[in-house]
Image (spheres, rainbow, N blue to C red):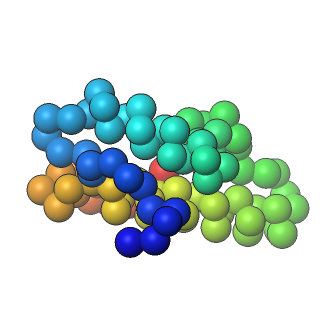
Amino acid sequence: MSDSDPKFHPLSGTNYPQWSGEMQAWLMTKGLWRLVSGTEKCPGTDAEAIEKWELRAEKAAGALYLNVTKEQRIHLDGIIDDP
């Protein structure tokens, strides 16, 4: 685990209230929260800007997936790449 990894427990069946606040704060430190919350929309037609946005979306989606227990990941089937 690196220094940039989250320092909180992954989402389980019982810890959503605590996990959601900690996950939001961690995503904010990575500059990904506005993307996840939907405030930052995919840019219109600029291919380079779209590529950058999509890479950040993949980072956010991956971070969310990795911060959910294996037992809860079933709920992410089919939407793993959608932060």
* The one of 8 and 64 positioned closer to us in this rendering: 8
Q: How many numbered marks have been drawn onto this rendered protein structure?
A: 0
Whether residue 82 appears in this view of the structure is no
- On the image, the x and y values in percent for residue 41 come to 70, 43
Q: In which quarter of the image is residue 21?
A: top left
In this view, the residue in front, 34 or 7, is: 7
Which residue does the image show at 29% across and 27% down from the upper left? 17
The quarter of the picture where residue 54 lies is bottom right
In the image, residue 22 sits, relative to residue 72, either above or below, namely above
Residue farthest to the top?
17
Identity of the residue furthest to the right in this view: 46
Q: In this view, does 30 lie to the left or right of 74?
A: right
Q: Indicate left or right for 26 with 47 as reference.
A: left
Residue reaching furthest to the front: 3
Q: Is residue 10 above or below residue 34?
A: below
Give residue 48's quadrant in the image. Answer: bottom right
Q: What x and y, as percent, mark residue 80?
A: 38, 60
- Vertically, is 57 above or below 34? below
User: Residue at (87%, 62%) from the top-left corner?
Assistant: 46
Q: Which residue is drawn at 12% across and 56% down?
A: 71
What residue is drawn where x is 64% and y is 39%? 34
Q: Where does the image place residue 2, in percent across and percent down from the top left? A: 46, 71
Q: Is residue 29 in view from this perspective? A: yes
